Amino acid sequence: MTLHVVSGAVIACRLFDVAFAIDLAKAEQDWANKIRTGSSRGRLTTTPAKAVAFGVPPVEVELDHVTLPLDPPVQAIASARVYEFGVVALTLRVNTADLTWPAFTERLNAVHSVVEQEAVWMPLLGRVRAGIGEALIRPATAFLEEDYLIGAVHAFDDAIQADALMQRIDLVPLLSGEVRPLSDAARADLLRHRYSYYTDDLVVLTWDRAFIFEPRGDSDVLDALEVANAQLLEMRYYDELLDAELPRMYDLVEATQRPHWPLPGARRFADLARRLYTLVAEVTELTEKVDNALQVTEDVYLARIYAAALDLFRVPTVSAAVNRKLAIIRDTYTALYDEAHSNRSETLEIMIVALIVIEIALAIIH
């Protein structure tokens, strides 16, 4: 017998890197003054604060409903979260009721086909930027993006346990978006990351989609997935930033090492060293904030899901690449500082020798 989804939702998330950083206190104040709709500081709803908490709670803002051109058209509840490390996370939530499981899967895939279009998101992003524009620190001119799609069910028409649920519904079309049957190996790989805490809840993660069965309506897993995506987005940003900076750094080092009078050369080395030190300090500070965006201590279940999402999204891999490039720049800074110090010493030695020669010459003349 086919299960019916009595209560559920399709949740589409799109995250944008909009600035190097965001002053959240100013963002909250500006939103209240300009837009005059609700805003609040985000917190996990059911987990004790001492177990799991945002490092710095993001600012949540209310947005207008959006009509999605499905058949028939549906209303999506729009909201946004603003993170201090420069990310705006937009969410569209389409509530569903009384759908068969195949119909729920079709609804999710239909929503996905619509929200893939930039035209759905850009007006929402423009509204958020207009409301908090003055809080943006070094705004971006081009946006990096990440997206994620979630099918959440709060109640089926039959009380069912998580183990039995996997036998009653086919999650593969929902998690893959494919209509053709997948191979056994592909199905097994797609369903590999699944987690349950109670007997009646279930979370299944993939690279770009997730299924959540949560009868109690908790949203903490949704929040953890959003933070993991935000961390991936920011690490991608820093990786690209340093990719562009390294060749420029090599060119500057080469230009600095060309023949020159010792004193100006020392200044060139020192100026470039200070510039690289500033870059390393800024990126290190922001990456630490990204790493500490969500602090998980005592909630073992949520910690497992969060860690699995980070691993699945390759956040540690991208973060390691960022750290390697930062190490190269730190080593270059150290070498430039040593070179500047050596040049200054050489300059002082030349000046001392020159003064001695002048003194000898004056003595001979007299």
Image (cartoon, rainbow, N blue to C red):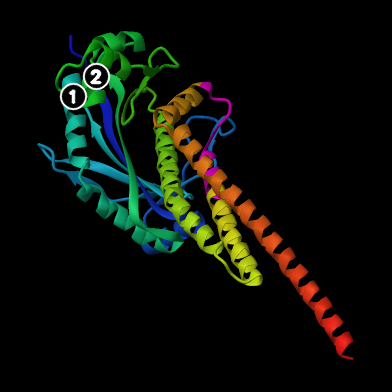
Question: Toward the viewer: 34 or 352?
Answer: 352
Which span of residues is magenta-colored?
285-300
Query: For residue 2, what is the image quadrant?
Result: top left
Report helix, strand or loop for mark 1: loop
Report the residue at 26% width, 32% height from top: 10
Report the residue at 45% width, 16% height from top: 197
Question: Toward the viewer: 274 or 46?
Answer: 274
Report the residue at 63% width, 68% height from top: 267
State left or right for residue 298 relative to residue 122: right
Residue 67 on the magenta span: no
Q: Give above or below for 52 relative to 277.
A: above
Q: Which mark is residue 54?
A: none
- Look at the image and tell me in which quarter the C terminus lies: bottom right
State left or right for residue 182 relative to residue 197: left
- Residue type (three-letter) at the residue carrying disc 1: Glu
| Whole-percent x, y for residue 288 in the image | 56, 43
| Whole-percent x, y for residue 231 in the image | 45, 40
Q: Answer yes or no: do the residues labelled 2 and 1 have beta carbons within 8 Å?
A: yes
Which residue bears the numbered disc 2?
A: 172
| Whole-percent x, y for residue 149 in the image | 29, 33
Q: Give above or below for 106 relative to 73.
A: above
Instruction: Answer few, some or many: residues within 10 Å of disc 2's Cα (few below 14, many 20 plus, some between 14 and 19).
Output: some
Q: Residue furthest left?
A: 71
Which residue bears the numbered disc 1?
A: 178
Q: Earlier in the sequence, mark 2 or mark 1?
A: 2
